[in-house]
């Protein structure tokens, strides 16, 4: 009941809090996917027809009562609603083009065609505009999915209906997808809380739909988060380049993937086991493998540079050290302030190199960022490939690979931040590289046909699994918990294996030796103890 009340409140917001008199008219509602100038015009015209004054009425005593003149309050409210719609549209478009951090209030009001004064009559600042716009987007998506869920028939019909509604909402407003998936985290705790709250509604609906299946059971929250994340990732990669029919064709396979996790075995329902202090220290000890921690010397006077006594070294060492410091600076500054705020001068200052030295290594800040990303991805992929190759059984190899990846990200927080968040939104080129990199890790999850009874896994299933795991990592990064990511290794292993080997076998592999740390964590702990 609380979820339905919350959804109704959100639905009321998407109609811009109209008064009871307004919502009782025959005018169409303005929902998030219809936030367009044409919709505004239709709404205005409809209200003009439905708000004509009533004719004069004659009472029995012969007195004719003229209708009272309507105040301008409704017209003003209508105008304010239209302004709010235009500002929401403008925020979506500006962020889709430039990202939240680079978007200015001036950009929003220019696109919306309103004055600065009007903007501040609606919103206190840019952040509030983003949060209200996010609320509108998610309210409409929730309304659609809830409606589809009610109209769907049984199992697995309601799961499929909910996925189709999610796809429809994204297709109708693709710019809103980037805002709701990624950019909302740029405003900090307020945005992260909004994202978690809204996604929780989708997760609850999927849980309800899955639990319509015959028999008893449920699905744990991390698995639901991975399902929602996987669906959103599939959409994000396709919504701008695939038509509706192509996207609809994916729904049966995605439904089969989502329903493969029900019911979850008892071992998977347990809360993730928090890492011990020793495990945390061991993971931190493995830093130094990716941009953010590459330079061999600690911060000196607030900057990285060659320590005193290191000046009598070869030129090749100096060049290599400068490059590492520049990559560290690019990664750390982007993780701290965002790519839009990144400046070449600041990178050089943080790396303790001259501007001349910077430009000897890189063309511009995008070049430095992309190289930092590529170096980190290359290092991570090598670590994962070694872990996978060390196992003869594919199922064990998947677990070892996930353990290696999560341990790597936990030990390299700056790189994890730019890989999970910034790379997707910096430029189209970095977004394409991010997609390719996730695909490279996803290929390590693909089982051989002999390991799944001769069946060839669907490519979309692999993509959805990888997307779900990526989103779990992203949620930890957004919450500032990337150092705790290894605690999710059993859950992530189950998510990767269950669609191919079944829930029980996946849970057994995922939770084996649960009382001891996974291989990568165990090795790190041993190294730390010897140190």
Image (cartoon, helix red, strand yellow):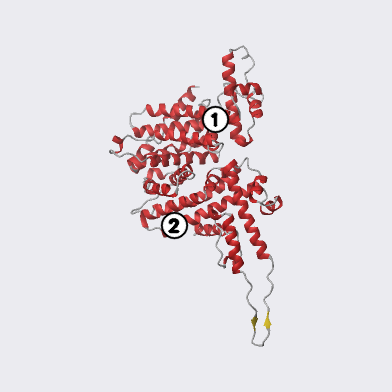
Above or below for 386 versus 268:
above
The reply to whether discs 1 and 2 touch (Cβ–Cβ < 8 Å) is: no
State the image coordinates of residue 174 (x, y, percent, origin top left). 52, 47
Residue 310 position, x and y percent, is: 61, 14
Q: Residue at x 51, y 41 (%)?
A: 475
Q: Is residue 342 visible?
A: yes
Could you say which disc has been placed on residue 55 in the image? none
Q: Nearer the viewer, residue 177 or 453?
A: 177
Is residue 531 or residue 333 the one in the foreground?
A: 333
Q: Position of residue 244 (x, y in %)?
A: 44, 49
User: Given the current orientation, which residue lies at the most extreme bottom position?
Assistant: 61
Mark identifier at residue 148? 2
When asked about the image quadrant of residue 158, the answer is bottom left
1 over 379 or under it: above or below:
below
Label 2 residue SS: helix
Q: Nearer the viewer, residue 487 or 305?
A: 305
Read off the residue under disc 1: 370
Label 1 secondary element: helix
Q: Residues within 10 Å of mark 2 (few under 14, many from 20)?
A: many
C-alpha gap between disc 1 and disc 2:
42 Å
Residue ID at (48%, 27%): 378
Q: Earlier in the sequence, mark 1 or mark 2?
A: 2
Query: Is 240 situated left or right of 336 in this image?
Result: left
Residue 281 visible to the viewer: no
Residue 240 position within the rendered picture, expressed as x and y whole percent measured from the top left? 49, 44
Q: Nearer the viewer, mark 1 or mark 2?
A: 1
Q: Is residue 188 left or right of residue 272?
A: right
Q: How many marks?
A: 2
């Amino acid at each position: 009941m609380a979820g339905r009340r919350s959804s109704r409140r959100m639905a009321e917001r998407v109609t811009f809090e109209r008064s009871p008199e307004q919502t009782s008219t025959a005018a169409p509602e303005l929902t998030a996917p219809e936030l367009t100038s044409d919709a505004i015009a239709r709404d205005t015209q409809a209200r003009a027809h439905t708000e004509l004054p009533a004719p004069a009425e004659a009472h029995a005593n012969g007195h004719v009562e003229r209708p009272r003149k309507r105040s301008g309050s409704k017209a003003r409210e209508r105008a304010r609603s239209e302004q709010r719609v235009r500002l929401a549209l403008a925020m979506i478009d500006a962020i889709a083009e430039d990202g939240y951090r680079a978007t200015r209030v001036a950009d929003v009001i220019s696109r919306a065609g309103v004055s600065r004064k009007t903007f501040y009559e609606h919103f206190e600042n840019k952040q509030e505009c983003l949060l209200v716009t996010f609320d509108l987007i998610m309210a409409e998506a929730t309304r659609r999915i809830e409606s589809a869920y009610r109209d769907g028939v049984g199992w697995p019909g309601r799961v499929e209906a909910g996925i189709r509604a999610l796809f429809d909402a994204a297709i109708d407003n693709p710019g809103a997808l980037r805002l709701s998936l990624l950019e909302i985290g740029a405003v900090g705790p307020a945005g992260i809380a909004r994202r978690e709250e809204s996604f929780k509604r989708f997760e609850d609906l999927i849980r309800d739909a899955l639990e319509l299946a015959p028999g008893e059971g449920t699905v744990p929250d991390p698995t639901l988060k991975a399902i929602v994340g996987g669906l959103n990732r599939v959409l994000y990669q396709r919504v701008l380049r695939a038509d509706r029919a192509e996207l609809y064709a994916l729904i049966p396979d995605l439904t089969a993937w989502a329903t493969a996790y029900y019911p979850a075995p008892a071992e998977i329902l347990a809360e993730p086991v928090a890492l011990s202090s020793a495990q945390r220290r061991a993971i931190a000890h493995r830093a130094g493998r990716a941009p953010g921690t590459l330079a061999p010397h600690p911060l000196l006077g607030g900057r990285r540079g060659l320590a005193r006594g290191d000046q009598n070294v070869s030129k090749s060492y100096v060049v290599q050290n400068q490059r590492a410091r520049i990559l560290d600076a690019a990664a750390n500054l982007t993780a701290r302030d965002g790519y839009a705020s990144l400046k070449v001068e600041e990178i050089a200052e943080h790396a303790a190199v001259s501007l001349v030295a910077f430009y000897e290594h890189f063309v511009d800040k995008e070049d430095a960022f992309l190289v930092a990303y590529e170096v980190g991805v290359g290092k991570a992929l090598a670590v994962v490939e070694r872990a996978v190759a060390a196992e003869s059984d594919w199922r064990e190899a998947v677990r070892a690979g996930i353990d290696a990846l999560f341990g790597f990200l936990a030990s390299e927080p700056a790189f994890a931040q730019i890989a999970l968040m910034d790379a997707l939104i910096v430029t189209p080129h970095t977004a394409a590289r991010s997609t390719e990199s996730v695909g490279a890790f996803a290929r390590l999850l693909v089982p051989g046909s002999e390991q799944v009874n001769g069946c060839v896994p669907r490519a979309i299933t692999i993509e959805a699994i990888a997307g779900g795991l990526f989103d779990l990592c992203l949620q930890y990064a957004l919450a500032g918990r990337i150092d705790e990511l290894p605690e999710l290794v059993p859950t992530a292993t189950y998510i990767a294996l269950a669609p191919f080997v079944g829930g029980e076998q996946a849970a057994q592999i995922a939770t084996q030796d649960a009382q001891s740390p996974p291989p990568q964590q165990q090795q790190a702990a041993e190294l730390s103890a010897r140190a």
